[in-house]
Image: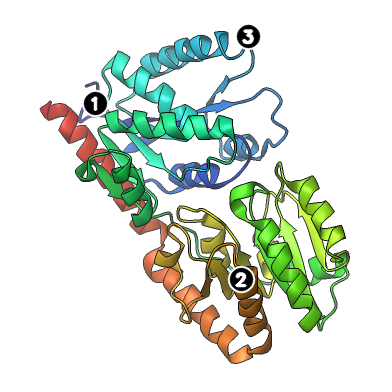
């Protein structure tokens, strides 16, 4: 152990970053809000051809020193790169005199475990979720689940995620539920008029918004099916999809084939999502799997009534009829019905909006989350000292 009482705890934040999303938001919040006495250095695994530089731009804007390990900089990548990245990670952690490694993401978990074992450092991982949407990711999920058994402590972002980890063979006593947090939104509404004008949205139209990665597990194709049904009954319904990902082209084609051109706007990735939440009248989360979704918490912080699928940690966030509406996953009929209910019931919208803001304020504040993370660090370090 290198920690002394005369200096802060130094934490190496290993993170796998493909595109700006939940992991990146959590890491940035750690950097912004951690209490004095903890110092972080992000060590980020990414690709040389990554187009989305939002995470790195925000780290730089915050004045944060970080290290970048490129997973495809050497060929053959599957053979040479892991060896090179491992050597780089060991060197960075050794020279940085870190006391603890905190990892986020499949690749980060794998490398952090080897580095921690090699250097004799305590280790903790935050598990944000498993999304085995293709054979390669399925392999990473299986590997990660097996490797996590060797971590001294693991943070799960929801109670169902903890249950899933225990089912994979992890010791329940080593898994802490640390639910994601979100900042309270200013709710200025400044961007609402400009965005709606830009998209040609009329004053009488009702906008359902989605924010997230356009990948299979997010279920946007099911949202489009529900939208097709809804607009036949409520022609004033509009949909705005904020985000990018591998399913974008397929979803655009599905929008055209369903006759939703002019009803659904794909606006791509947006580095600042706050004005977009302001432009929405309601939020929809059609996911097939989730941990504790940051986008849902952000929408609720903005006072948006939400329709969300009852997957993962979502039912721990949304209390049906109190701060949002829950529907079964992949059930387009129920989703359409719930969206119509929001459109036609202003009193319900007001109730859900108030409940959403109150929930975020009372249960998902940053201060409480930081205290939970800090307590896990303390338990991990104390356990390492005793061993």
Q: How many marks?
A: 3
Apparent side of residue 307 relative to residue 178 in the rendered image (left or right): right
- Proximity of marks 2 and 1: CB atoms separated by less than 8 Å: no
Q: Position of residue 249 (x, y in %)?
A: 80, 46
- In the image, 127 versus 134, the foreground residue is 134
- Proximity of marks 2 and 3: CB atoms separated by less than 8 Å: no
Q: Is residue 103 above or below residue 245?
A: above
The residues tagged by marks 2 and 1 sit, at their Cα atoms, a distance apart of 42 Å
Q: Quadrant of residue 175?
A: top left
**Sequence-earlier tag: 2 or 1:** 1
Residue 363 circle label: none
Residue at image position (28%, 48%) is 176
Q: Position of residue 60 (x, y in %)?
A: 60, 34
Residue at image position (63%, 9%) is 76
Which residue is denoted by mark 3 in the rendering?
76
Q: Position of residue 187 (x, y in %)?
A: 61, 71
Which residue is denoted by mark 1 in the rendering?
3
Apparent side of residue 51 relative to residue 9 in the rendered image (left or right): right
Q: Is residue 235 above or below residue 382?
A: below
Question: What secondary structure is found at the residue carrying circle 2?
Answer: loop
Mark 2 neighbour density, 10 Å: few (under 14) some (14–19) many (20 or more)? some
Question: What secondary structure is found at the residue carrying circle 1?
Answer: loop
Residue at image position (81%, 84%) is 204
Question: What secondary structure is found at the residue carrying circle 3?
Answer: loop
Which residue is denoted by mark 2 in the rendering?
187
Colour style of the rendered protein structure:
rainbow
- Quadrant occupied by the C terminus: top left
Q: Which numbered disc, 2 or 3, marks the residue closer to the eye? A: 3
Q: Is residue 362 above or below residue 157?
A: below
């Amino acid at each position: 152990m290198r920690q002394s009482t005369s200096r802060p705890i130094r934490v190496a934040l290993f993170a796998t970053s493909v595109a700006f999303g939940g992991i990146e938001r959590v890491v940035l919040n750690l950097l912004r809000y951690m209490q004095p006495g903890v110092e972080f250095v992000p060590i980020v695994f990414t690709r040389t051809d990554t187009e989305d530089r939002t995470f790195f731009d925000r780290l730089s804007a915050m004045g944060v020193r970080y290290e970048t390990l490129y997973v495809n900089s050497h060929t053959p990548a599957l053979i040479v790169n892991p060896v090179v990245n491992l050597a780089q990670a060991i060197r960075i952690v050794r020279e940085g005199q870190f006391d603890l490694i905190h990892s986020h993401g499949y690749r980060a978990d794998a490398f952090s475990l080897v580095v921690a074992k090699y250097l004799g450092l305590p280790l903790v991982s935050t598990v944000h979720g498993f999304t085995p949407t293709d054979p390669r990711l399925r392999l990473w999920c299986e590997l990660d689940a097996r490797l996590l058994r060797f971590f001294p402590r693991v943070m799960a972002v929801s109670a169902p995620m903890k249950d899933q980890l225990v089912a994979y063979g992890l010791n329940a006593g080593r898994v802490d539920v640390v639910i994601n947090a979100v900042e309270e939104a200013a709710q200025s509404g400044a961007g609402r008029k400009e965005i709606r004008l830009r998209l040609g949205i009329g004053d009488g139209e009702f906008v359902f918004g989605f924010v997230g990665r356009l990948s299979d597990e997010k279920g946007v194709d099911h949202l489009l099916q529900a939208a097709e049904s809804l607009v036949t009954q409520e022609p004033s319904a509009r949909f705005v999809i904020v985000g990018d990902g591998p399913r974008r082209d397929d979803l655009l084609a599905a929008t055209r084939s369903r006759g939703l051109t002019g009803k659904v706007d794909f606006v791509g990735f947006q580095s600042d999502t706050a004005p977009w939440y302001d432009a929405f009248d309601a939020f929809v989360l059609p996911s097939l799997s989730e941990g504790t979704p940051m986008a849902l918490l952000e929408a609720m912080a903005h006072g948006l009534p939400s329709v969300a699928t009852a997957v993962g940690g979502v039912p721990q966030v949304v209390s049906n009829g109190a701060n949002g509406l829950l529907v079964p996953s992949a059930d387009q009929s129920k989703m359409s019905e719930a969206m119509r209910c929001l459109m036609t019931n202003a009193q319900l919208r007001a109730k859900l909006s108030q409940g959403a803001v109150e929930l975020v304020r009372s249960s998902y504040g940053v201060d409480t989350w930081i205290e939970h993370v800090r307590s896990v660090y303390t338990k991990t370090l104390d356990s390492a000292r005793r061993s």
